[in-house]
C-alpha cells in the first residue's frame, strides 16, 4: 500500500521506516529541511537504538522516500499525521498548530476514499473536528485516530511489536471502512495476534492520555512513598520490590528517583487537565496536579541532597552530573530532570560539569551556559560530589574503585536508584539516594 507520513520526528520517522518493514511503500514529509536531508542520506537525526539500521534497510528497499513537499503524498491511500503537540507557552493546554497545519496541507493531496490517520497525542475532541473539516473540504475522505504508545529508546521494537492497536473511527466499529484499511496497514502485526480495540474518536484520543497519566501517577506514587521513606528511614527500593510482587500492582514504572521528564508525560498530564477544565470535568483530574507537583519536588530535593552532602553549601563546589537525557538510550533533553537539576546547582553557585553518552550536542545547543565533558571521568575530575541523574548502562557499570581515583571527595548521589549501594560504599564512597538511608 502507498502511505504518507506527515512529520518525521521520533514518532513519524520510526513509523515510516517500520511501515516499509511491514511491506508498504512510504513517503515521509517534514518541513525541516535538515531533518529530511539527513533521513534521505540514511542518517538518523536522533539517537534511537535500532533505528539507524532500520532506516538504511528501508531506504535500500527503494520503498522509502523523504521530502519537504507534501505534494509527494498525492496518490497515497493512507496519510498518517505524526507531528508534535507541545505544551503551549504560558499555559497547560496542548499546542495544536502543527496538527492543524499538517491536516490543512493534506487537503491539497487527499482524494475521496483516502484515509487520514492521526497518531499525534491530542486533546479529546480534536479528531471529531478534523473529521468534519475533511468531510466538508474533500467529501468521501475517511478519518481515523490511531494513538501510538512507543517509548523512546525502544521506539523500533514498540512500533513493530506493539502490545495493542487502537483505532478510533467514525462508526466506532469494525464495520467502518477506515478500520478495514488500517487492518491492511497492520496486517503483519495483526497476524501475530496483537489485540485490537476499535472504538470512537473520543475513546481513542483518551486511551493515550489516560495511559500516560496512569504511568505518571505510578511514578509519582512511588516518589511520594520515597518522601515518606526519607521521613521514616525506610527504603523505597525494597518497598517497590515488595509491593511490585503483587501482580495487581506490578514492579514496572515503580522506580523511585528523580521522576519523569521528556516530551510526553509532563505535557500530556497538563494538557489532559486543561482539556478536562474546558469540558467542565476538572475535578476528575485534580489528582494529576498532585502527580505533577510530587514529580517536580523530586528535582528540588535532589538539589537539597547535593547541598547536604557538600557540607551545607554549594558555593564553589565542583559537581559532576552524569546524564543529561531525560532517560537512558535517548538524546532527548525535553524537560530533562537531569538538566533541570544541573541548572539549579549552577544557579546556586556550584561549578557543574555535565556529561552524557548521546545528549551533549542537544544540551549544549539548548543550555550553552552549562559546562560539558565527554566522559564521566572528565566530568568528575576533582569533583566534590558526583550525581548520577540518568541511568545509562555506562554509569550503572562504573567501577567505583577506579572512579574514586578521579574525584576529590568520594560522594555519590544516585538520582535513579540505579547503582549498587554495597559496591559504592565498600569502595569508600558516601552513597546517598532519594528515598533511601544514607550508605
Ligand atoms: C512515554 C510512554 O511510556 C509511552 O508509552 C508513550 O508512547 C510516550 O510517552 C509518548 O507519549 O509518546 P517516553 O516519554 O519515551 O514514553 O518515556 P518513559 O519510558 O515513559 O519514561 C518517562 C520518564 O519517566 C523518564 O524521565 C523516566 O526516567 C521516568 N521514569 C520511568 C521514572 O522516573 N520511573 C520509572 O519507573 C519509569
Image: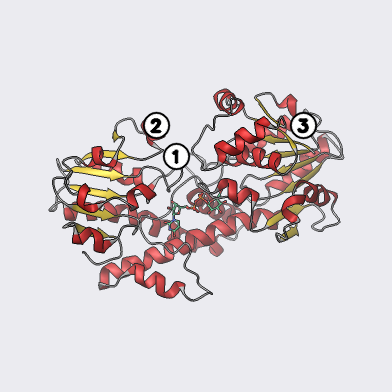
Comparing 312 with 8, the one in front is 8
* Vertical placement of residue 381 versus 259, above or below: above
Numbered disc total: 3
Q: Which SS class for mark 1?
A: loop
Separation of residues labelled 1 and 2 (CA atoms): 9 Å
Residue 420 is drawn in which quadrant? bottom left
Q: Position of residue 73 (x, y in %)?
A: 75, 30
Residue 131 position in % (x across, y down)? 77, 44
Whichever of labels 3 and 2 marks the residue nearer the N terminus, that label is 3
The secondary structure type at the circle numbered 2 is helix
The answer to whether residue 375 is left or right of residue 361 is left
Residue shown at the point (83%, 35%) measured from the top left: 138
- Tell me the quadrant of the picture where the C terminus can be found: bottom left
Q: Residues within 10 Å of mark 2 (few under 14, many from 20)?
A: some
Q: Residue at x 45, y 72 (%)?
A: 244
- Separation (CA) of disc 3 from disc 1: 34 Å
Tell me whether the residue at label 1 lies in contact with that at label 2, contact meaning CB atoms closer than 8 angstroms: yes
Q: Badge 3 is on which residue?
A: 107
Q: Is residue 225 above or below residue 9?
A: below
Q: Is residue 35 above or below residue 345?
A: above
Q: Nearer the viewer, mark 3 or mark 1?
A: 1
Say which residue label 1 marks. 331
Amino acid at each position: 500500500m502507498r502511505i504518507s507520513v506527515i512529520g518525521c520526528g521520533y514518532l513519524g520517522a520510526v513509523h515510516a521506516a517500520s511501515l516499509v518493514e511491514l511491506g508498504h511503500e512510504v513517503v515521509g514529509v517534514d518541513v525541516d529541511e535538515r531533518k529530511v536531508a539527513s533521513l534521505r542520506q540514511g542518517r538518523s537525526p536522533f539517537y534511537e537504538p535500532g533505528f539507524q539500521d532500520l532506516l538504511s534497510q528501508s531506504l535500500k528497499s527503494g520503498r522509502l522516500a523523504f521530502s519537504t513537499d507534501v505534494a509527494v503524498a498525492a496518490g497515497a491511500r493512507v496519510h498518517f499525521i505524526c507531528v508534535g503537540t507541545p505544551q503551549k507557552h504560558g499555559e497547560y493546554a496542548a499546542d495544536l498548530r502543527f496538527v492543524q497545519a499538517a491536516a490543512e496541507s493534506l487537503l491539497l493531496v487527499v482524494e475521496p476514499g483516502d484515509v487520514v490517520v492521526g497518531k499525534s497525542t491530542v486533546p479529546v475532541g480534536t479528531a471529531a473536528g478534523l473529521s468534519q473539516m475533511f468531510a466538508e473540504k474533500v467529501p468521501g475522505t475517511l478519518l481515523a485516530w490511531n494513538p501510538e504508545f512507543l517509548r523512546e529508546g525502544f521506539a523500533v521494537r514498540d512500533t513493530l511489536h506493539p502490545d495493542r492497536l487502537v483505532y478510533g473511527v467514525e462508526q466506532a466499529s469494525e464495520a467502518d471502512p477506515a478500520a478495514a484499511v488500517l487492518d491492511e496497514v497492520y496486517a503483519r502485526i495483526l497476524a501475530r495476534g496483537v489485540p485490537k480495540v476499535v472504538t470512537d474518536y473520543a475513546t481513542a484520543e483518551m486511551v493515550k492520555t489516560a495511559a500516560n497519566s496512569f504511568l505518571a501517577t505510578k511514578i509519582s506514587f512511588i516518589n511520594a512513598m520515597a518522601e515518606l521513606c526519607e521521613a521514616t528511614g525506610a527504603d523505597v527500593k525494597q518497598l517497590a520490590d515488595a509491593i511490585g510482587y503483587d501482580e495487581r500492582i506490578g514492579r514496572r514504572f515503580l522506580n523511585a528517583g528523580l521522576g519523569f521528564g521528556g516530551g510526553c508525560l509532563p505535557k500530556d498530564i497538563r494538557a489532559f487537565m486543561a482539556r478536562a477544565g474546558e469540558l467542565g470535568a476538572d475535578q476528575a483530574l485534580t489528582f494529576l496536579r498532585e502527580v505533577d507537583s510530587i514529580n517536580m519536588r523530586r528535582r528540588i530535593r535532589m538539589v537539597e541532597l547535593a547541598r547536604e552532602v557538600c557540607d551545607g553549601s554549594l558555593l564553589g563546589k565542583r559537581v559532576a552530573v552524569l546524564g543529561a537525557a531525560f532517560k537512558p538510550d535517548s538524546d532527548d533533553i525535553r524537560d530533562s530532570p537531569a538538566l533541570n537539576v544541573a541548572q539549579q546547582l549552577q544557579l546556586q553557585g556550584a561549578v557543574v560539569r555535565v556529561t552524557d553518552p548521546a545528549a551533549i550536542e542537544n544540551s549544549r545547543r539548548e543550555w550553552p551556559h552549562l559546562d560539558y565533558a565527554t566522559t564521566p571521568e572528565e566530568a568528575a575530575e576533582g569533583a566534590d560530589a558526583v550525581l548520577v541523574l540518568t541511568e545509562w548502562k555506562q554509569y550503572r557499570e562504573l567501577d567505583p574503585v577506579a572512579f574514586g581515583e578521579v574525584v576529590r571527595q568520594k560522594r555519590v548521589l544516585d538520582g535513579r536508584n540505579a547503582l549498587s549501594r554495597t559496591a559504592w560504599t565498600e569502595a569508600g564512597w558516601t552513597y546517598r539516594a532519594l528515598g533511601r538511608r544514607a550508605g
